[in-house]
């Protein structure tokens, strides 16, 4: 999501008239690209199976897809749904709120629960979305606070909200906060991909968790490749 100012549009330095914005954004993007390549190279060296997986998919395209708040709302809507169906609900919510992006917390609180139910959002998800909006509106949770917390505290804070479980919180870590050492064990697609490539039963969560420790500190990057191998990296 972008504001009316493009992220690539430079900001003028008031003191000397230099245009700084575009170079700093470009530098940050370049630094991340280099780190991503280093992470991928490290993973390729771990074993032949991982090397084959990475080489088969190609360059890692992992990216953030919104602010922590936006990804949290997206993830609640996407619980137990395919990416395509989740996107449909996201678009319905945006249309219901009368905007062009996911509605702010205060706008969500204005929407009657019955209206959310009419666009197909379940009662449980409706209540969870409202809890998220209330927490943000009261400043109990803020994007700034989440960015300052370490991974375990982010999980603890988000999972304190009824209806927000580990998978939902982990999506925020991965796709908003850009944390690189997470594997969402409750994601069935990931477990199926582990079974396909590494021969560990998708139902043996304990063994999968233990096995993947060897890929720390880049389990998120490996997760992206496991996702991409199954669905081409579509959506998430």
Image: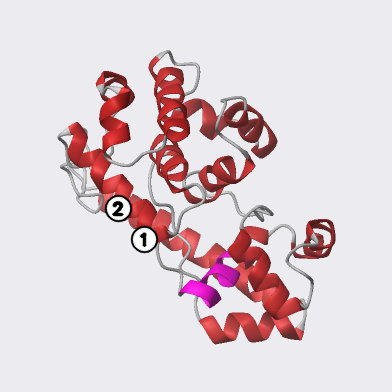
Of the numbered discs in the image, which one, if any, rests on residue 88?
A: 2
Screen quadrant of the C terminus:
bottom left
Which percent across, then down, holds residue 226?
60, 71
Q: Is residue 2 visible?
A: no
Quadrant assignment, res 138: top left
Q: From what the image shows, is residue 38 above or below residue 118?
A: below
Instruction: Find the distance from the CA under tag 2 to the CA under tag 1.
Output: 6 Å
Q: Secondary structure at mark 2?
A: helix
In the image, the segment drawn in magenta is: 223-231
Q: Is residue 28 visible?
A: yes
Type of secondary structure dominating the magenta stretch = helix
Residue at 72% of width from left, 83% of height from top? 49
Closer to the camera, 138 or 8? 138
Residue at 29% of width from left, 26% of height from top? 114
Label 1, on which residue? Answer: 84
The answer to whether residue 173 is left or right of residue 63 is right
Labels 2 & 1 near each other (Cβ < 8 A): yes
Which percent across, then down, holds residue 195?
72, 74
Quadrant assignment, res 30: bottom left
- Name, please, the residue furthest toward the top: 138
Q: From what the image shows, is residue 105 above or below residue 24?
A: above
The answer to whether residue 187 is left or right of residue 96 is right
Query: Does the stretch in magenta take in 225?
Result: yes
Q: Secondary structure at mark 1?
A: helix
The answer to whether residue 73 is left or right of residue 223 is left
Closer to the camera, 122 or 56? 122
């Amino acid at each position: 999501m972008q504001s009316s100012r493009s992220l690539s549009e430079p900001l003028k330095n008031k003191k000397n008239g230099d245009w700084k914005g575009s170079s700093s954004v470009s530098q940050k993007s370049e630094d991340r690209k280099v780190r991503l390549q280093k992470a991928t190279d490290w993973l390729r060296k771990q074993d032949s199976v991982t090397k084959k997986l990475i080489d088969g998919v190609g360059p890692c395209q992992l990216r953030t897809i919104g602010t922590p708040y936006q990804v949290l709302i997206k993830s609640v809507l996407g619980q137990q749904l395919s990416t395509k169906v989740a996107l449909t609900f996201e678009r319905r919510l945006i249309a219901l709120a009368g905007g062009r992006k996911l509605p702010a917390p205060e706008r969500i609180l204005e929407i009657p629960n019955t209206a959310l139910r009419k666009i197909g959002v379940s009662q449980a998800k409706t209540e969870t979305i409202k809890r998220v909006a209330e927490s943000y509106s009261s400043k109990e949770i803020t994007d700034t606070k989440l960015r300052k917390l370490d991974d375990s505290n982010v999980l603890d804070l988000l999972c304190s909200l009824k209806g927000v479980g580990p998978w939902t919180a982990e999506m925020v870590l991965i796709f908003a906060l850009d944390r690189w050492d997470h594997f969402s064990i409750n994601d069935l697609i990931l477990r199926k991909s582990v079974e396909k490539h590494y021969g560990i039963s998708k139902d043996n969560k304990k063994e999968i968790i233990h096995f993947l420790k060897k890929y720390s500190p880049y389990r998120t990057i490996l997760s992206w490749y496991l996702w991409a191998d199954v669905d081409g990296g579509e959506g998430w």
